[in-house]
């Protein structure tokens, strides 16, 4: 599964959950933490933390395309921080 948020003018987030249940947040190492913002998650206002919004919208879209093309693998376009 790949969760992405695109809608903020400048930043996104990318969250990957593998078939084995492991998960990780994607980020671009060259970007500083982005702005905090609230997005709609299934009708619930949800906060996006600045340290999780280190992805541009273009890179989030690229991650989604690569996820689909690879059969669900994490994209090499991002660095990954394992979630705990």
Image (cartoon, rainbow, N blue to C red):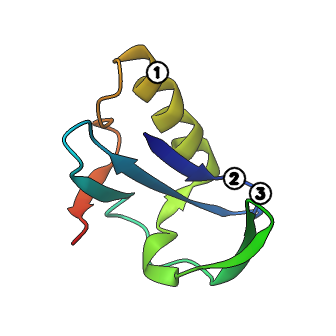
Q: Report x, y in % for residue 60.
A: 54, 45
Label 3: state its secondary structure: loop
Q: Which mark is residue 10?
A: none
Q: Rounded to the nearest whole Å, what is the CA distance between mark 2 and mark 3? A: 4 Å
Q: Report x, y in % for residue 44.
A: 75, 72
> Which quadrant: the C terminus?
bottom left
| Residue shown at the point (29%, 30%) measured from the top left | 73
| Residue shown at the point (62%, 82%) measured from the top left | 35
Label 2: state its secondary structure: loop
| Residue shown at the point (52%, 33%) measured from the top left | 64
Q: Which mark is residue 7?
A: 3
Label 1: state its secondary structure: helix
Q: Report x, y in % for residue 14.
A: 47, 54
Q: Rounded to the nearest whole Å, what is the CA distance between mark 2 and mark 1? A: 17 Å
Mark 2 lies on residue: 6
Rate crowding at label 2 as few (under 14), some (14 to 19) or many (20 or more) other CA atoms within 10 Å. Answer: some
Q: Quadrant of residue 72?
A: top left
> Which quadrant: the N terminus?
top left
Q: Nearer the viewer, residue 67 or 17?
A: 17
Q: Rounded to the nearest whole Å, what is the CA distance between mark 3 and mark 1? A: 20 Å
Q: Is residue 77 above or below residue 80?
A: above
Q: Quadrant of residue 7?
A: bottom right
Give whichever of discs 3 and 1 has the lower sequence position: 3
Q: Report x, y in % for residue 56.
A: 57, 55
Give whichever of discs 2 and 1 has the lower sequence position: 2
Q: Are marks 2 and 1 in contact (CB under 8 Å)?
A: no
Mark 1 lies on residue: 68
Q: Is residue 84 shown left or right of residue 39?
A: left
Rate crowding at label 3 as few (under 14), some (14 to 19) or many (20 or more) other CA atoms within 10 Å. Answer: few
Frontmost of labels 3 and 1 is: 1
| Residue shown at the point (69%, 52%) measured from the top left | 6
Q: Are marks 2 and 3 in contact (CB under 8 Å)?
A: yes
């Amino acid at each position: 599964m790949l969760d992405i948020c695109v809608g903020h003018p400048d930043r996104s987030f990318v969250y990957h959950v593998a078939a084995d249940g492991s998960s990780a947040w994607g980020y671009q190492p060259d970007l500083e933490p982005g702005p905090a913002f609230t997005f709609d998650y299934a009708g619930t206002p949800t906060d996006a933390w600045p340290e999780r919004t280190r992805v541009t919208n273009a890179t989030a879209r690229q991650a989604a395309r690569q996820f689909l093309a690879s059969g669900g693998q994490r994209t090499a376009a991002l660095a990954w921080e394992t979630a705990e």
